[in-house]
Amino acid sequence: MSPRQPWTPLAVEALKHMADGHDQAAIDTVKRIHDRYGADAVPEVMIAWVDTVLAVLPGDVTQSARNGIGLAFMNIDSGDVTGADEVPPAVRWAGRFLVARAAFDRDQAEALLGSFTTEQEYGRAVFALLDTCAGVLRTAGRL
């Protein structure tokens, strides 16, 4: 996780709830972050989740992301791998955000954060990113 912020314990709690399959508890925890620390804290939390994932991935993910990598999605339960066109838009958004952060592509990450036209889209993307990060950390034995 990024340097300790006042919301860090809640961000970790949300990851743990999601990794344990307690989706509603994870959503409620993210809402508490929003209510307690404001809307601007949520993108910071999202970045912290991604940075936590990047820290546990093997190899030089940053260099791979900068060199250009194909974005594919694996269903952790089934092992099936699909392309970006075959996953829900929020999941695709989460993958793109993770890759942008890995590549230190601030412009792309900011564009993605500004791409939502509704609160529902934004909420689905936050949930998808949380689910993605928790899944990776659970699979890596970190949660």
Image (cartoon, helix red, strand yellow):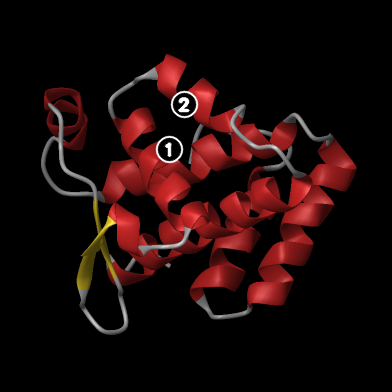
Is residue 30 or residue 67 the one in the foreground?
A: 67
Contact? badges 1 and 2 (CB < 8 Å):
yes
CA separation in Å, label 1 and label 2: 6 Å
The image's mark for residue 97 is: 1
Residue 1: image x %, image y %? Answer: 48, 41
Tell me which residue sits at (37%, 40%) in the image: 96
Q: Amino acid at mark 1?
A: Phe
Point out the image quarter for the C terminus.
bottom left
Label 2 crowding class (10 Å Cα cut-off): few <14, some 14-19, many 20+? Answer: many
Q: Quadrant of residue 18?
A: bottom right
**Could you tell me if residue 9 is visible in this image?**
no
Helix, strand or loop status at disc 2: helix
Residue 71: image x %, image y %? Answer: 23, 47
Is residue 108 or residue 10 the one in the foreground?
A: 108
Q: Relative to 71, does residue 114 appear above or below in the rendering?
A: above
Q: Quadrant of residue 7?
A: top right
- How many marks are shown on the rendered structure? 2
